[in-house]
Image: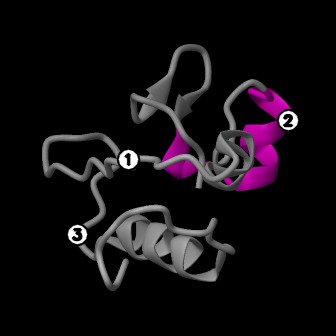
């Protein structure tokens, strides 16, 4: 899961058409979502998954959104400081 605003990267093409190793080798400056979470160090992070039928990387099965949910579920969570009785 790479974090980038657009489906395509100039000079590279549509990211969804390439594997992770190929993206990392060609465009090392694009972080993974896991790396972003690491840098944010327990801060609240709002993740927006774009998946429009009009986008070059449209996925009718929403695998990207499912992968985000899976990553969030397996990552350790910082201690909650809110006043709700139950978080998440």
Q: Dot 1: what SS? A: loop
Give the magenta-colored segment's residue range.
Answer: 15-28
| Of the two numbered discs 2 and 1 in the rendering, the one whose residue sits closer to the viewer | 1
First-in-chain label (2 vs 1): 2
First-in-chain label (3 vs 2): 2
Q: Position of residue 88 (x, y in %)?
A: 37, 78
Q: Dot 3: what SS? A: loop
> Alpha-carbon distance for marks 2 and 1?
27 Å
Which residue carries the number 2 mark?
Answer: 25
Mark 3 is surrounded, within 10 Å at the Cα level, by few (under 14), some (14 to 19) or many (20 or more) other residues, namely few
Q: Position of residue 14 (x, y in %)?
A: 48, 37
Mark 2 is surrounded, within 10 Å at the Cα level, by few (under 14), some (14 to 19) or many (20 or more) other residues, namely few
Q: Residue at x 53, y 14 (%)?
A: 10
Q: Residue at x 44, y 74 (%)?
A: 69
Which residue carries the number 3 mark?
Answer: 60
Q: Position of residue 24 (x, y in %)?
A: 79, 39
Which residue carries the number 1 mark?
Answer: 46
Do labels 2 and 1 touch, CB within 8 Å? no
> Observer-nearest residue: 27 or 32?
32
Quadrant of residue 78 in the image? bottom right
Decide whether residue 24 is among the magenta residues: yes
Q: Position of residue 59 (x, y in %)?
A: 30, 63
Q: Dot 2: what SS? A: helix
| Of the two numbered discs 1 and 3 in the rendering, the one whose residue sits closer to the viewer | 1
Left or right of residue 45, residue 19 in this image: right
> Alpha-carbon distance for marks 3 and 2?
28 Å
Q: Quadrant of the N terminus?
A: bottom right
First-in-chain label (1 vs 3): 1
13 above or below 60? Answer: above
Mark 1 is surrounded, within 10 Å at the Cα level, by few (under 14), some (14 to 19) or many (20 or more) other residues, namely few
> Observer-nearest residue: 34 or 45?
45
24 above or below 81? Answer: above
């Amino acid at each position: 899961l790479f974090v980038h605003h657009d489906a395509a990267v100039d000079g590279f093409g549509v990211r969804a058409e390439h594997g992770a190793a190929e993206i990392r080798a060609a465009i090392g400056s694009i972080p993974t979502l896991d790396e972003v979470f690491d840098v944010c160090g327990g801060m609240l992070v709002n993740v927006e998954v774009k998946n429009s039928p009009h986008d070059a990387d449209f996925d009718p099965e929403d695998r990207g959104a499912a992968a985000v949910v899976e990553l969030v579920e397996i990552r350790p969570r910082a201690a909650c400081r809110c006043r709700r009785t139950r978080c998440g």
